[in-house]
Image (cartoon, coloured by chain):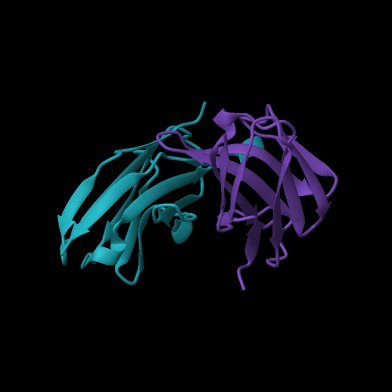
Chain colours: A purple, B cyan
């Protein structure tokens, strides 16, 4: 089983709909992240969380919200989806306080029509 | 704005050759550097971490770091068609930004049989 699991893997929806992407991890990491990836723009950080009570905006948080339900779970919501939020979304985790890397889930391909 | 720069490619090499991927970064005090491999439509997969000046080898992969020149590279020896992917350089921020990885936009590598 994957250490970082994202659901759903693919989603097609319509403009104006509310969407939730979920991420769970078994790595025991405290830090969790949400990124989106667009062709030519690379990976951009949406939100990050150091623990259940510590949530922070990344560089492109407008139009998104998050919830850290538990140490192992971090969800991303689009309250009213718009077409330019069509992208590949990744959840990632990292260990607290270290210099180590981030570990990515398999991603969610989201299309908004 | 801290930046990580990579040639976008595509870099094309014949099977069995050495592929050389380069990355420069702007944050002079960065301490942690990572290379990720990403197949089309898939998630970034960590292949190398490097923290000290010099070379670090792992199988066919060698990462090279020169902090004075703010330069990190990845060499892939005996390149295989399965190495064809986009390679992302990532640099961990310093000080209050040390939670954050800044990613380059990636270099597309094609290994020709």
Left/right placement of residue B82 relative to residue A1 reads left
Q: Quadrant of residue A25?
A: bottom right
Left/right placement of residue A49 relative to residue B110 reads right
Left/right placement of residue B108 relative to residue A50 reads left
Q: As displayed, is residue B23 above or below residue B17?
A: above
Residue B59 position in % (x across, y down): 33, 72
Residue B52 position in % (x across, y down): 44, 54
Q: Quadrant of residue B107?
A: top left
> Can residue B99 be seen in the rendering of this structure?
no
Question: Residue, x 60% and y 48% (percent of image)?
Answer: A11
Q: As displayed, is residue B51 above or below residue B70?
A: below
Residue B82 position in % (x across, y down): 29, 65
Question: Residue, x 41% and y 47% (percent of image)?
Answer: B89
Which quarter shows the C terminus of chain A?
A: top right
Residue A23 position in % (x across, y down): 69, 55
Q: Nearer the viewer, residue A82 or B49?
A: A82
Q: Nearer the viewer, residue B53 or A109?
A: A109
Question: Residue, x 57% and y 30% (percent of image)?
Answer: A83
Left/right placement of residue B13 relative to residue B52 reads left
């Amino acid at each position: 089983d994957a250490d970082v699991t994202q659901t759903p893997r693919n989603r097609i929806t319509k403009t104006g709909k509310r969407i939730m992407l979920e991420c769970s991890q078994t790595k025991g990491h405290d830090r969790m992240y949400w990124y989106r990836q667009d062709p030519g723009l690379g990976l951009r950080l949406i939100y990050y969380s150091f623990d259940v009570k510590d949530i922070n905006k990344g560089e492109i948080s407008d139009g998104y919200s998050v919830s850290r339900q538990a140490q192992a779970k971090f969800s991303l919501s689009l309250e009213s989806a718009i077409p330019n939020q069509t992208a590949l979304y990744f959840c990632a985790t990292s260990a607290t306080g270290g210099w180590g890397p981030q570990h990515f889930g398999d991603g969610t391909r989201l299309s908004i029509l | 704005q801290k930046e990580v720069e990579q040639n976008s490619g595509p870099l094309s090499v014949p099977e069995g050759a050495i592929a050389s991927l380069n990355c420069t970064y702007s944050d002079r005090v960065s301490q942690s550097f990572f290379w990720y491999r990403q197949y089309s439509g898939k998630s970034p997969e960590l292949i190398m971490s490097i923290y000290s000046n010099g070379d670090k080898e792992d199988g066919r992969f060698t990462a090279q770091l020169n902090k004075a020149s703010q330069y990190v590279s990845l060499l892939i020896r005996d390149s295989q068609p399965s190495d064809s992917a986009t390679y992302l350089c990532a640099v961990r921020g310093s000080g209050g930004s040390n939670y954050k990885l800044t990613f380059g936009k990636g270099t597309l590598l094609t290994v020709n049989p």
